[in-house]
Amino acid sequence: MQVDDSHFPLVWMQVNRALAPTANPFAGFEALLEREQAFVLLNDEGLGEGRYEHTHEERKQVSLWMKRHKEALRAFVKVAIYVEADAAIRAATESFAPAYEKFWGYPMLIVATRDEALARARDSLQA
């Protein structure tokens, strides 16, 4: 996962972009949490085919990392917003949103356009 915080508190993440094999996949996320300021995660890679499938070991590492950072995640991440143009994929993914929020501690929104994502992000930061 790569994190672009150049427009903080709007933070773009790219899950499908590979990091160097020795890179800490959580380093960018940890740096965001260390700021101790509210932010929104945005992703416009789409939720359809071509998504990276994590191995069992990677899922285990993500779960352990999340448990160590759960308090900070709940305090500072206002929402994760995913852009998906395909209405059928959006509808199918929305049923997953409650489980996502329970696991990560912050809500997941799925929107149709980048402009809608930015508008919802700004609304979330002002709430």
Image (tube, rainbow, N blue to C red):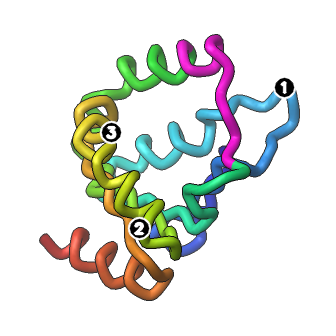
Q: Which residues are magenta?
A: 51-60
Q: How much space separates mark 3 and mark 2, taking CA atoms? A: 21 Å
Front residue of this view, candidates 87 and 54: 87
Callout 2 touching callout 1 (CB < 8 Å): no
Q: Position of residue 100 (x, y in %)?
A: 33, 39
Q: Amino acid at mark 2?
A: Pro
Q: Residue at x 66, y 44 (%)?
A: 1
Tell me residue 23's x, y (percent): 78, 31
Residue 22 - label? 1
The relative height of residue 54 versus residue 32 in the rendered view (above or below) is above
Query: Which residue matches tag 2?
Result: 9
- The tally of labels here is 3
Foreground: disc 3 or disc 2: 3
- Looking at marks 2 and 1 on the same chain, the residue that comes earlier in the sequence is marked by 2
Q: Is residue 8 magenta?
A: no
Q: Which residue is mark 3?
A: 100
Look at 63% across and 63% down and name the residue there: 45
Picture layout, residue 37 above or below residue 114: above
Q: Hey, what amino acid is under mark 1?
A: Thr
- Label 1 and label 3: CA atoms lie apart by 28 Å
The amino acid type of the residue labelled 3 equals Tyr
Residue 27 located left or right of residue 97: right
